[in-house]
Amino acid sequence: MKNLLTFLIAIAITITGNAQDLGDVKITSKKYGLSKMKKASKKIYINSFHIDFEVYKEAVDFKAGGDGGRISGNKSSATARAAVGLGGVDANKIQEKTNLLFNNYVSRLKKEGYEIISGEEAGKTKTLSGWEKASGPYLKESRTGIITCAPENYTFYYKKAGILGLGGLGVQAKLSKELGDVIIADVNMHVMFSENGSDFFSAGGAKVKILTNLRLIDQYTVTIPKKLKKKNSTMGKLFGSVQLKGAVENYPINSMVSFAYGKTGLGSTAQFTGTLKDNIEIEGVMKKEKIVAYQKQGSFVPTSLTTFSDYSNALADRFSKTAKWIEVDADKYAQGFYNACNTFLNKQLDEFFSKL
């Protein structure tokens, strides 16, 4: 009896540890022509199934100096840079959870009576001719600090000049027709741990603020500082690369589950796109923190007592950097990753099949 009680307590502790509170998860969806999709072939091609997770974030701000005249004086340039990374995230555990999510997804599709078209068959279509082919297990940094994961035993196609979330965009109707009037499915989810804070009080200097908040995003714009630009001239080769100071690249992303159907004939297409009404916050994995970098601009107002040394020191470019590494528990992170994605996926599948 004592051993049985110990065993039951251990199970209860395990369940409690894995049942992270996701709050009230609310979804939304856009539907068009689903009555036509009911008549589609009972076959589905999974065009994309990818989950991005963020492990590193960097932010930069730049304030240019200038001549403000005798009243304001001259100001130096200032740069502030902040970075935060996650330690402890186990890529193998994320791959395992992604595999599990995919297997759950495929099992549900088959349970509803659908046959899954292989990636090899889809690769023979004219639409995907010339596209790059990849197969899971797949873990690759798609953007700085963001890893894209695709499941094992899954083949997909992409173009080299792609975006976050692999898989063809805008090709669903063509693929549907070429594969015999089948349904084309796409699943793309993004687990982020950072977001940009506001910089309302950065007058007179450069300031960046990064907030930490682990979540499956609804929609979000990833901002990444632009990389160094190579100089091709002889002087450029001598002095190296030049950076576009303070410039960032923006990549809008959103988590979504979609099904599309395109049949020859006007008005014969159908679409279901499921998204979140709000982010799914993943609790119990990491604290919400604030990482700030601030650099005040140097200033110089010429007077009869100032020297050239005062001038050069004040107008020298100024740089400030703040970096932080946050350790997380690998199992808790992977479980939170799975719980959020699986909840969203299941809710959207329930919504989709309830309408067919």
Image: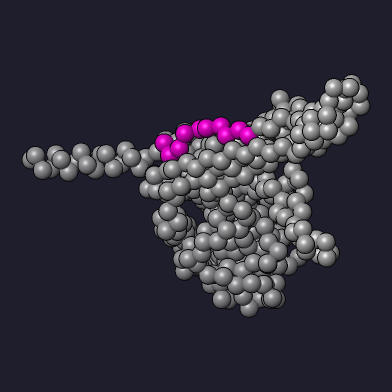
Percent coordinates x, y for residue 49 in the rendering: 55, 59
Magenta segment, principal secondary structure? loop
Residue depicted at x 89% and y 32%: 67
In the figure, is residue 274 to the left or right of 316? left
At x 61%, y 33%, the residue is 292
Question: In this orientation, which residue lies closer to the viewer: 97 or 307?
Answer: 307
Does residue 122 lie above or below 34 as drawn?
A: below
Seen as rendered, the residue at the extreme left is 1
Q: Position of residue 346 (x, y in %)?
A: 48, 48
Quarter of the figure with residue 5: top left
Q: Residue furthest right?
A: 69
- Start and end of the magenta stretch? 284-293
Tell me: 324 left or right of 296: left
Question: Does the magenta segment cover residue 251?
Answer: no
**Closest to the observer: 246 or 313?**
313
* Residue 25 seen in render: no
Q: Nearer the viewer, residue 276 or 202?
A: 202
Reply above or below: 256 against 60.
below
On screen, 126 above or below 235?
below
Residue 69 image offset from top left, x and y in percent = 92, 27
Q: Quadrant of residue 285?
A: top left
